[in-house]
Amino acid sequence: MIVFVALLLVAGQVLVFLAIDRAVSANTLVSVRGEIAVGERIFRRLLDERSQQLTAAARLLTSDFGFRQAIASGDQATMASALGNHGSRIGAAKMVLIGPDGQVMASAGASIGAEDAFPALVQAAMKSGSASAIALSDGRPHQLVVVPVLAPAPIGWVVVGFRIDAALAAELGQLTALDVSFASWQQGQGWTLSASNLPADAREHLQGLLDQTTPANAAYRLAAGAPDERVAAATLLVSGKDQAVLAVLQRSMAEALERFANLRTILIGLAALSLAATVVGSGMIANSISRPVTALVQFAQRLESGDYERGPPPGGNDELGQLATAFENMRLAVSAREQQIKAMAYHDALTGLPNRALFNDRLQQAVGVAQRLDNPVSVMLIDLDRFKEVNDTLGHHVGDQLLIEVAVRLRGVLARATDTAARLGGDEFAVLLPTADEATAREMAQRLRRAFTQPVFIEGRTLDVGGSIGIASFPRHGRDPHVLMSHADAAMYFAKRKRLPYAVYETRHATAMDGSEQLAMATELHLAVSSEQLVLHYQPRISLRQGTGLHAEALVRWQHPKRGFLAPQAFMPFAERTDCIHEVTRWVVGEAIGQAARWHAAGLPVQLSINLSVRDLLGPHLVGDRRLALQSHGASARWFMLEITESAIMDDPARALEVAGQLRQMGFQLSIDDFGSGYSSLSVIKTLPVAEIKIDRSFVAQVTSDRDDLAIVRSVIDLAHHLGLEVVAEGVESSAALALLKDLCCDHAQGYHVAMPMPLDEVETWLRARQTGRQGRPASGERTA
């Protein structure tokens, strides 16, 4: 009986031991997967934070007056030297300056190829003010940032490339407590392990796994692999037709299980001692083990789901208590790491002040409260004077100490707990004053000025700190946070230009030109209309359904005698702020109608699209001018599609509906341009007599790779078709996008993959070929629509 009991007890202990060992292994796997999930979130936040830091570093160069002056004067040597010096200071692998025409003006660092103009990234930066991405350059992955060179309008774009190498993998691995690897893939070459902090044998193993995958299934197959050696998660950072970049995060199961090696030994000892115990004792032991293990499993599951608030159940001094303590230490470490990441994401590492993201969030909240309670809010932007001179002459370490001292003085001046001082980047600071009107903001500006006039003592040197301050207040200067920031920025630049301590926003600050420059540009634009300096280029579009109709869009260009070939964005924004827009539009419409009449007479039945601005639509002479132009050229209104932007419609919906109705009665077809980029009301659009809508290129550009853009494009097409409208997709730049749009039942496509904007002789050749059934895309033409 004793032997039977002993054997039964041994069998029970063996089963318990196996259960515990399996539970430990399972819990460890769950824990490791939890660490991987946490590490992946930390990894993404670190990349975003690094992108923001790199963008801030790049903005230091673009804010340099000498650099902007060199661009304006075309001084190649100075531009290249500035790029090289700044690239060396910030550790950039390559520095590229791209002009407004999309061409490389100067560069420094690694070899520069034609692909380094990065047109898609520059286009994204044109819309949002800056852009960042990861891409392959010279066959190796780089983290790229693009920032504009403002004067204060964009006169160029600086592309800064930072190589993703082993040092970055090691740094990210240290912060995430994971093994980090970067792999790149190119068509015809397969995967290359570009950077990793893995040991050599583990790298070979990972390379072997990658060789069995493609960019389409690499992330899934690596994550779904057997966890015997390493648990992995993979993220595609770049996914394209010809190239891809993959980040692989791994955690060694062997290392994770090492902490439980002693536990196995102790459990074996307990099993041996329990041979002398009774059946009741063995039952009690089993009961005392199973409950804590179950609790630890539940705790590990909470960790996996991201719940770090509650710790594991309290344990005693036994092995399970030690395991619970180990889990608790792990929970505290992971929680502390997440808190650290949050602090890094919302605070400036150098000064400890809130960064741009946190400032914008507080500004959004303050404006929302002010709108509900009808309270004022004031925003102040501060740009330090001569900061670059301090950096260049005394070194960056002195500049950093100066920024820290400025942050201390900002904190000292702010009296209320609700006020916020932030560092936006470089030597630019911001102050948010909730419930403060313009008068209070002026008083604060005076206090800041007095604080800044006090000398700063750094390393035995006396430095004078000066700054230019711009002020904008809600609701007088704007009711939107972005508008307030823009107006405060304009006032700050005005104060800097006029050498004032501060300036409160006025409408005249909004233009980037001073009075003499505006007068000169207006005079030149008037002269351009009368002296044949303006020319029309045409960008065809194609039908994705059956039919051979010919359609093109008329786009104006300015052949300036001194400034060279100017795209619309170089002069149309100025024209739209002045009466010049009416002269330019009158010329464009007359020229386009005349050309359409000549095409129809020559047997080319082209429907021509013409853009209308806000001022054109709301002006008193639009309908009359169009009627006269048609009569003078003997043209039919049915030959033309007039494109109206969403912003033009929403500026005055009633007036827009009235004018649109008159134009439609004349026979013109109407189109809503850049649909999705504004804030138009569906109730307004439903009442407009439009025939089509054009989906904004920002949604079409990534439609093959971005699920959100795909959902938007599909919804817009379905909505338009239910309203009886046709759909044109702008910005089609690949065969994959064209095929996808056709599958989505889009009616028409326009973009560089179809045809670029072309001068008259080239577009006639293209249209003739299209008419006779020969599909062709010209090799020449600019990429500026």
Image: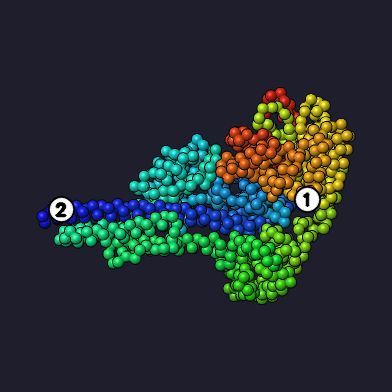
Q: How many marks?
A: 2
Whichever of labels 2 and 1 marks the residue nearer the N terminus, that label is 2
Q: Which residue is mark 2?
A: 7
Image coordinates of residue 209 in percent, x first then y, are 40, 41
Question: Residue 626 location in percent, x, y?
Answer: 85, 39
Residue at point 76%, 51% (across, down)? 651
> Residue 641: image x %, image y %?
76, 37
Residue 463 left/right relative to 573: left
**Place of residue 672 in the rendered image (x, y in percent of width and height, measured from the top left):** 72, 42
Question: Is 634 in front, or is 368?
Answer: 368
Name the residue tied to disc 1: 652
The three-letter amino acid code for the residue at tag 1 is Asp
| Closest to the observer, 473 or 783 | 473
Q: Is residue 742 above or below residue 688?
A: above
> Which element type, helix, strand or loop, lies under badge 1?
loop
- Visual colour scheme: rainbow
Please give the name of the residue rendered at 44% of the width and 63% of the height, measured from the top-left corner. Answer: 309
Is any atom of residue 207 visible in this view?
no
Amino acid type at circle 2 is: Leu
Q: Residue 595, located in which quarter of the rendered image?
A: top right
Where, quadrant-wise, is the C terminus in this rendering? top right
Tell me the crowding category of disc 2: few under 14, some 14 to 19, or many 20 or more residues within 10 angstroms, Cα based.
few
Tell me what residue is drawn at x 22 percent, y 59 percent.
283
Q: Which quadrant is home to the N terminus?
A: bottom left
Of residues 502 and 335, the one nearer the viewer is 335
The answer to the question of whether label 2 and label 1 lie on touching residues, with beta carbons closer than 8 A, is no
Residue at left offset 72%, top offset 56%: 152
Q: Secondary structure at mark 2?
A: helix
Cα distance between the residues tagged 2 and 1: 91 Å
